[in-house]
Image (tube, rainbow, N blue to C red):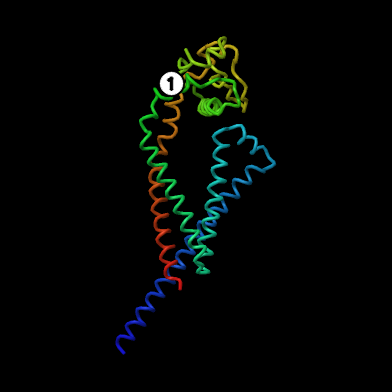
């Protein structure tokens, strides 16, 4: 009789624990679902908004990239939250398995990205970027990915070259454009009253320091992102930890479902 009562009590405790995991997982994933829906809504609104806001985003490469990142993250979180909610509340093993595999893929991708960043950190030097800029940058080619990326960086951060405009000396850009000292992306623009025209494009292209941006992009980008590096690192650790716990909960619930 004692053994039967102990077994029943143990079974009841397991059921309560399973129920607790189930509802915790549902609430957790419902919040993820809401967050994903919000990000998707913001991203879609920016892209289809009939006002001038869409045009502002389109002319700013950093904002344009950010909107698409928001859409991708929103879609991923929306799907993740949906799978987790349905799998938990319906106690569906198939959905829970999909949820687990989805998080595992994301977790491994983030881990691989962190490892690759650590391995190739030595390549992210001024010397490396300067060599690549001189070798591949074309200036006015809008179909070359390397060139358009550098143009976007120089336009966004109001900078020129990696270290300074002198980086374009003895470069592919000067070979293709012998009459220009710096590319158009290095030229200063009027900043008053929303005017985005060049201050003096001809003088800039001729190398006049008064009409070009003289600061290198390496220091500009580092200065811009320096304040976010520690926040991003802490956030990455939190996200990885949450994903790890989500996988553990999903497997516990998966195994506990009869």
Relative to 160, say whether 241 is above or below: below
**For the point 57% across and 19% down, which residue is it?**
184
| Residue extending farthest left | 2
Image coordinates of residue 139 in percent, x first then y, are: 56, 20
Residue at label 1?
131
Q: Secondary structure at mark 1?
A: helix
**For the point 70% across and 41% down, which residue is it?**
50
What crowding class fits label 1: few (fewer than 14 Cα within 10 Å), some (14-19), or many (20 or more)? few
Q: Quadrant of residue 57?
A: top right
**For the point 52% across and 11% down, which residue is it?**
208
Image coordinates of residue 217 in percent, x first then y, are: 46, 25
Image coordinates of residue 113 in percent, x first then y, are: 42, 41
Q: Nearer the viewer, residue 199 or 133?
A: 133
Task: Answer left or right for 148 relative to 221.
Answer: right
**For the point 43% across and 46% down, which residue is it?**
110
Q: Nearer the viewer, residue 99 or 211?
A: 99
| Residue extending farthest bottom | 1
Relative to 122, say whether 31 is above or below: below
How many numbered discs, if any? 1
Q: Nearer the viewer, residue 170 or 184?
A: 170
Q: Nearer the viewer, residue 178 or 45?
A: 178
Image coordinates of residue 140 in percent, x first then y, are: 59, 20
């Amino acid at each position: 009789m004692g053994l039967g009562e102990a077994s029943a009590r143990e079974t009841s405790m397991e059921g309560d624990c399973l129920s607790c995991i189930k509802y915790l997982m549902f609430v957790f994933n419902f919040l993820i679902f809401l967050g994903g829906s919000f990000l998707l809504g913001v991203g879609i609104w920016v892209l289809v908004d009939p006002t001038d806001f869409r045009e502002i985003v389109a002319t700013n490469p950093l904002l344009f990239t950010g909107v698409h990142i928001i859409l991708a993250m929103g879609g991923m979180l929306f799907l993740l939250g949906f799978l987790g909610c349905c799998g938990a509340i319906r106690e569906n093993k198939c959905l829970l398995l999909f949820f687990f595999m989805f998080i595992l893929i994301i977790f491994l991708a983030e881990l691989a990205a962190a490892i690759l960043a650590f391995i190739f950190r030595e390549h992210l030097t001024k010397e490396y970027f300067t060599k690549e800029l001189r070798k591949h940058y074309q200036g006015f080619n809008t179909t070359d990915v390397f060139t358009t990326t550098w143009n976007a960086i120089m336009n966004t951060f109001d900078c020129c070259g990696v270290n300074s405009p002198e980086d374009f000396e003895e470069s592919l850009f000067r070979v293709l454009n012998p009459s220009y000292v710096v590319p158009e992306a290095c030229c200063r623009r009027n900043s008053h009253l929303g005017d985005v025209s060049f201050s003096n494009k001809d003088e800039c292209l001729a190398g006049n320091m008064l009409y070009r941006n003289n600061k290198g992009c390496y220091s500009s980008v580092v200065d811009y992102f320096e304040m976010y590096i520690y926040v991003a690192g802490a956030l990455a650790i939190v996200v990885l930890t949450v994903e790890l716990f989500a996988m553990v909960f999903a497997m516990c619930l998966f195994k506990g479902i009869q």
